Image: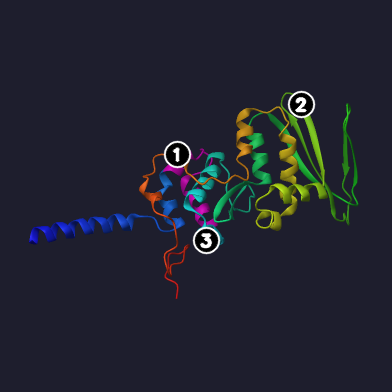
Amino acid sequence: MTTTNQQGMIAKTQSNKVAKKQPQTIKDYISVMSGEIAKALPSVMTPERFTRIALSAVSNNAKLASCTPQSFLAAMMNAAQLGLEPNTPLGQAYLIPYGGACQFQIGYKGLIDLAYRSGEVKMIDAQVVYENDEFEYELGMDPVLKHKPARTNRGKPIYYYATFKLVNGGQGFQVMSYEDVLDHAKKYSKSYSSGPWKTNFDEMAKKTVLKKLLKYAPLKTEFVKQMNTDESIKTTIEEDMADVPNEFFDAEYQEQPGEDPVTGEIKE
């Protein structure tokens, strides 16, 4: 009987150890995934810096802590593979909570960074046109784009435009009215009612017109794939994290009763 009890106690102790290792919060999962994140990161960003940025994003937005760990880590991995810093003042990328999942969104500056990194772009830019600016554009066989900003009192935004020049000499531009951008955002953006569309409309508008311009630019497939990750939501980890033990995701993720999902402290 004593042996059986001891074996039972040993088995229970081992089970408790496994249970303690089971991640309970988003922060736990970030720690578990640190090795895979390090493998995916480009040389321009250290694993330590990226982990700090991700943890800071969770701490600054409580709703992110309630996202499924799979979608949050997939969004993090998207940012890691593109070498973009999410949820920082740089505006390169955003991790946005949406319906219990985490959406990855490329920022205006992140899109420009990726375009330059392709090695095919010599110049790329996007601008806001205000109602008191001098602005003229024509399409057709000889397209024209002229913009002279007003010195003062520029008024409200009325147009957004993007331009590019390629290393091989190709060039182009795209113009969208304020109303066109607004309609596009309401129709296609899952996170229009929150996130950067509400905090930085002009930056998101410039990104919208940039994406429309680059969609038809003669750029390499790799850049197009990168751009297509914008506003994506993944509910599975897929091959990016194939080495992660399955048991970490077998159990349904949920907050522990009385536990703060960000700090891990017990709530009163």
Q: What numbered label is drawn on residue 39?
A: 1
Q: Nearer the viewer, residue 15 or 65?
A: 15
The mark that comes first in sequence, 2 or 3, is 3
**Quarter of the image where one finds residue 9:** bottom left
Question: Which residue is farthest bottom?
Answer: 268
The overriding secondary structure of the stretch rendered in magenta is helix
- Residue located beneath label 2 in the image: 170
| Disc 1, SS | helix
Q: Are marks 1 and 2 in contact (CB under 8 Å)?
A: no
Q: Is residue 2 left or right of residue 30?
A: left
Residue 178 % position (x, y):
82, 49
Instruction: Quadrant for the N terminus, please.
Output: bottom left
Residue 60 % position (x, y):
56, 61
Q: Please state the extent of the stretch shown in magenta in the rendering.
A: 36-59
- Residue located beneath label 3 in the image: 59
Q: Is residue 9 left or right of residue 65?
A: left
